[in-house]
């Protein structure tokens, strides 16, 4: 029996049935009101905004069919043929004329969707809860993306809670919830989580916010989390000077996974349920909140011009992704200390970690920021054993370049102009049209001086070392325990190093990663080689790599390995381990002016103009 929707009869109506959560499936119906034609084509997205990789969501469709439904004829129904057109398109074909289709009340499309991929960009349904990503769930009808939509959720029998930024319809029961979307874009941009979980409601600047905490049981101090989130939200409101939403949802899924994805009026976060029991983990989570909330402005509304209109069927290559994600990554940590939810030492520790990640990646000398942005679709989300050698993260290096740009602006204007001002101006000038890399560079030049444009161009178009010394000097920072506060990076540790990482499997050691131009690389060691012995002694997980401590850098030793069943003898010359654990700190000999600039940078929250 088919029951047509009763609310908003002229809307496209999606109905999602969660009746079998333990089978990890949902049954979806799309009710299409009369006025359709025999050229109707269903199109499923292949990617979701904010996560720049083609994900082939249609691989999770188990069955799909279409039929006519006519309530005026006592729910008479007859099948319609669906013709496959490519990997993500189906066309309704039945030989009906447009006139005969118009006389019908509804066309009904039904499909079953398998939902068991745990991430912020896919779907997951189980007995405890269900999480749906719009792009992974709903098709659009070609040519009708701007029509109003209703979404009906039929909950599992023991579920009672729903969290989504979509506005509720007046038609609601305990087991059936109905929501409205103005367009297909709004539907796709509004993730949904269902189950049983607490929802905290709080206000910041007269705007309502919600924290839905799924799967945390009693392990979270929700009041403390809300208090810290509210401080971050307040800081970011002041930063941008405008609040572009009416209400905002934070969907926090305690799944023992990680990640976050931004949306216009909500964000999805994934973390461990034990997050609040460990200080470092909790600060990481607050930084994730800060990052995704910053995207409410930067990325969701203020977009690179190439993303101004989403094309859900194919890649949209982006030269400015380091601005969208890297600058966001710079400010996400900075807002923690400006919001007084982390200490100065914690912030400098986080900045140090970003510096380490960039400095210890050989790929920094291979790939530039603009290329890293452009290649996101084919490289960033597909890491392999050579990623660290050949690529750089537009998140991490983008954040460091943003920091250095902030310092360059401050130095050029005697601390009158900051990166904060550039982002505010970008928002004011390019909100409607989207921006290009050239637009951003022009703003930097206008606010900081023409010489900064060439400096910025070098940072984003050339691979190589970054000069961080001007930033250290400006803020009165240095590396802890370094021989000189003028030293850019500590250069040696004195520890033995072979330049590869390994992993243990069933008591055997296998090479997982080989660093370019390292002792292992020069010796000819390969990824997936099994380490058997070094210097005639058996290598085991219990003694590796600590056993290297008995040797000295420069020694040449025999290394026995197995490669696809063949025993090989290699000669390896031990090297010296690069520094990994250095730490930024305030320079006790810094000038009063530098200390004042540091204080201003870390605490001044509202840009002028």
Image (cartoon, grey):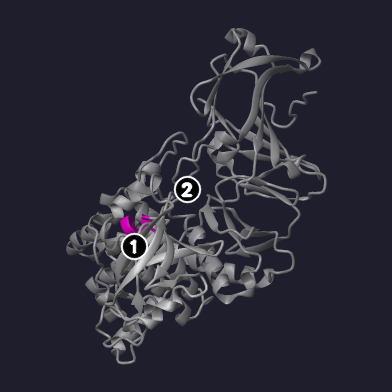
Please report the bounds of the magenta region as a residue range. Answer: 386-400
Residue 140 drawn in magenta: no
- Mark 1 or mark 2, which is nearer to you? 1
Please give the label number shown on residue 569.
Answer: 1
Position of 16 relative to 80 (above/below): below
Of 345 and 171, which appears nearest the observer? 345
Q: Main secondary structure of the magenta part?
A: helix
Which type of secondary structure does the marked residue at label 1 adopt?
strand
Q: Quadrant of the N terminus?
A: top right
| Real-space Cα separation, disc 1 to disc 2, in angstroms | 44 Å
Q: Quadrant of residue 68?
A: top right
Q: Are marks 1 and 2 in contact (CB under 8 Å)?
A: no
Position of 467 relative to 260 (above/below): below
Count of marks overlaid on the render:
2
Q: Choose the circle earlier in sequence order: 1 or 2.
A: 2
Q: Where residue 174 sits: x, y (%)? A: 81, 45
Q: Quadrant of the C terminus?
A: bottom left
């Amino acid at each position: 029996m088919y029951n047509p929707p009763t609310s908003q009869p002229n809307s496209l109506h999606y109905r999602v049935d969660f009746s079998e959560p333990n089978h990890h499936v949902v049954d979806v119906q799309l009710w299409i009101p009369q006025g359709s034609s025999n050229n109707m084509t269903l199109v499923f997205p292949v990617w979701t905004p904010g996560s720049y990789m083609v994900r082939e969501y249609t691989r999770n469709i188990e069955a799909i069919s279409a039929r006519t439904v006519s309530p005026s004829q006592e729910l008479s129904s007859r099948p319609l043929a669906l013709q496959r057109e490519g990997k993500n398109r189906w066309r309704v074909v039945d030989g009906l004329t447009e006139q005969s289709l118009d006389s019908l009340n509804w066309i009904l499309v039904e499909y079953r969707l398998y939902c068991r991929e745990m991430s912020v960009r896919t779907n997951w349904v189980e007995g405890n809860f269900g999480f749906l990503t719009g792009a992974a769930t709903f098709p659009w009808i070609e040519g009708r993306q701007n029509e109003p939509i209703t979404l009906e959720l039929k909950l599992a029998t023991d579920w009672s809670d729903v969290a989504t930024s979509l506005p509720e319809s007046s038609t609601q029961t305990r087991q059936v919830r109905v929501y409205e979307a103005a367009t297909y874009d709004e539907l796709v941009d509004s993730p949904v989580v269902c189950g049983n979980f607490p929802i905290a409601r709080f206000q910041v600047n007269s705007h309502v916010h919600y924290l839905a905490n799924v799967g945390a049981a009693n392990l979270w101090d929700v009041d403390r989390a809300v208090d810290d989130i509210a401080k971050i939200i307040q800081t970011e409101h002041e930063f941008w000077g405008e609040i572009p939403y009416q209400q905002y949802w934070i969907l926090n899924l305690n799944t023992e996974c990680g990640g976050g994805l931004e949306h216009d009026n909500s964000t999805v976060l994934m973390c461990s349920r034990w997050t609040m029991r460990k200080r470092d983990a909790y600060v990481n989570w607050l930084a994730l909140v800060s990052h995704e909330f910053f995207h409410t402005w930067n990325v969701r509304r203020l977009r690179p011009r190439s993303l101004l209109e989403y094309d859900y069927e194919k890649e949209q290559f982006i030269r400015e992704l380091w601005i969208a994600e890297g600058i966001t990554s710079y400010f996400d940590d900075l807002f923690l200390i400006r919001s007084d939810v982390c200490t100065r030492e914690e912030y400098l520790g986080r900045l140090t970690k970003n510096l380490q990640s960039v400095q210890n990646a050989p790929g920094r000398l291979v790939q530039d920021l603009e290329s890293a942005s452009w290649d996101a679709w084919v490289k960033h989300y597909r890491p392999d054993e050579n990623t660290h050698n050949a690529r750089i993260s537009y998140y991490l290096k983008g954040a460091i370049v943003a920091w250095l740009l902030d310092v360059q602006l401050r130095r050029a204007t005697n601390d009158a102009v900051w990166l904060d001002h550039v982002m505010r101006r970008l928002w004011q000038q390019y909100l409607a049209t989207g921006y290009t890399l050239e637009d951003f560079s022009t703003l930097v030049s206008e606010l900081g001086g023409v010489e900064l444009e060439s400096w910025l161009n070098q940072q984003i178009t050339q691979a190589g070392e970054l000069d961080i010394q001007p930033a250290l000097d400006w803020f009165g920072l240095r590396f802890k325990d370094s021989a000189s506060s003028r030293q850019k990076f500590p250069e040696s540790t004195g520890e033995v190093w072979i330049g590869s990482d390994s992993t243990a499997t069933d008591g055997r050691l296998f090479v997982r990663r080989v660093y370019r131009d390292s002792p292992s690389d020069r010796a000819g060691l390969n990824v997936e080689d099994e380490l058997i012995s070094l210097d005639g002694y058996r290598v085991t997980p219990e003694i590796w790599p600590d056993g290297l401590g008995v040797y000295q850098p420069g020694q040449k030793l025999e290394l026995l390995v197995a490669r696809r069943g063949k025993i090989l003898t290699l000669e390896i010359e031990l090297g010296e381990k690069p520094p990994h654990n250095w730490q930024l700190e305030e320079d006790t000999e810094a000038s009063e002016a530098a200390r004042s600039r540091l204080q201003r940078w870390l605490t001044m929250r509202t840009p002028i103009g």
